[in-house]
Amino acid sequence: MNVIFQTPEAVTQTITNSIAGNISWLLIGIVFFIIAAMIVYFLKNIIVNTVLGLMGWGLLTYMFHIDLPFWASLVVSAIFGLAGLGVMVVLTVLGIIN
């Protein structure tokens, strides 16, 4: 099966004949689809959490003038979202961080 000197149509036919009716290729395709769907689902949650955290940080910093440490609060809100930002605000109100 030397595919280097064959036409593209012949190569397609050779590949189709070798995988047609083979159930393992179907299972591999299903597994790849499930993995891709899981990655998209988790990345979507992380991206939404990050965007909401950064928007909340901007709202607290520029609208409500809550004096949070710049880099620490920015990084925490980008990584942990609104939950991290809430912890930073509680720590600031308690006087633990300035």
Image (spheres, rainbow, N blue to C red):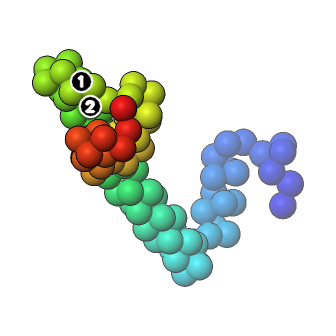
Q: Residue at x 62, y 70 (%)?
A: 19
Q: Residue furthest left?
A: 64
Q: Amino acid at mark 2?
A: Trp
Q: Which secondary structure lies at badge 1?
A: helix
Residue 25's place in the image compared with 49, above or below, is below
User: Image point 14% across, 20% down: which residue?
Assistant: 63
Q: Is residue 74 left or right of residue 12?
A: left
Calculate the distance from the C-alpha at mark 1 to the C-alpha at mark 2. Answer: 6 Å
Q: Position of residue 12 (x, y in %)?
A: 63, 52
Q: Residues within 10 Å of mark 1 (few under 14, many from 20)?
A: some
Which residue position holds label 1?
Answer: 61
* Circles 1 and 2: CB atoms closer than 8 Å: yes
Of the pair 61 and 23, the residue shown nearer to us: 61
Disc 2 is placed on an element classified as helix
Residue 94 in percent (x, y) is at 26, 46
- As drawn, the label of residue 13 is none
Name the side, left or right, on which 25 lies relative to 7: left
Q: Nearer the viewer, residue 38 or 17?
A: 38
Amino acid at dot 1 = Thr
Q: Please provide percent x and percent y for residue 35.
A: 48, 64
On the question of residue 43 being in view, the answer is: yes
Question: Which quarter of the figure has residue 76?
Answer: top left
Residue situated furthest top in the rendering: 62
Numbered label attached to residue 57: 2
Q: Quadrant of the N terminus?
A: bottom right
Residue sitting at x 38%, y 28%: 69
At a point 56% along the width and 72% down the height, the residue shown is 28
Task: Please tell me in which quadrant of the rendered image residue 67 appears.
Answer: top left
Residue 72 position, x and y percent, is 44, 34
Look at the image and tell me whether residue 58 can be seen. Answer: no
Instruction: Classify residue 64 as left or right of residue 44.
Output: left
Q: Quadrant of the C terminus?
A: top left
